[in-house]
Image (cartoon, rainbow, N blue to C red):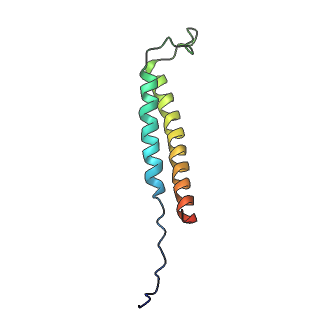
Amino acid sequence: MTDRPRTPSRHRTPNFRRFIITGALIGLVIGVFLGMRDSGGPSYSPEMNYSDSTAIAFLGVVGVLLGGGLGAGVAVLFDRTGRDGR
């Protein structure tokens, strides 16, 4: 029986840029969808007269920021669990 030398396992890190961009795009889609909904829900205020494009842009930007942050968090979790050898 011959013992072969063990090669160390190579740790693959996730591509953070792809995770962040994917999360940002998903957040943008969700934000635009929420901005395009018909107004009149529980948070609707008749005193505030924002145009539809303003609501879509605002919620789209918020979605990009939250989605990008969430994507970065997922990438960090994948990176940490890969280093522990689990």
Residue at the farthest top position: 46
Residue 48 percent coordinates (x, y): 57, 13
Residue 31: x %, y % from top left: 46, 30
**Image quadrant occupied by the N terminus:** bottom left
Q: Measured along the vertical axis of the image, is residue 70 above or below residue 85?
A: above
Residue shown at the point (57%, 59%) measured from the top left? 80
Residue 56 is situated, as x and y percent measured from the top left of the image, at 45, 26
Task: Please tell me which residue is depicted at 46% across the width and 43% down the height of the picture.
Answer: 23
Looking at the picture, tell me which residue is in the foreground, 25 or 9.
9
Task: Identify the residue at horizontal 58%, vertical 64% (top origin).
Answer: 84
Left or right, residue 56 beside residue 44 = left
* Placement of 5 over or under 15, stated as above or below: below
Residue 38 falls in which quadrant of the image? top left
Of residues 79 and 54, the one nearer the viewer is 79
Q: Residue furthest front?
A: 1
State left or right for residue 38 relative to residue 85. left
| Along the viewing direction, whichever of 18 and 4 lies nearer the viewer | 4
Residue 86 placed where, x, y %?
54, 62
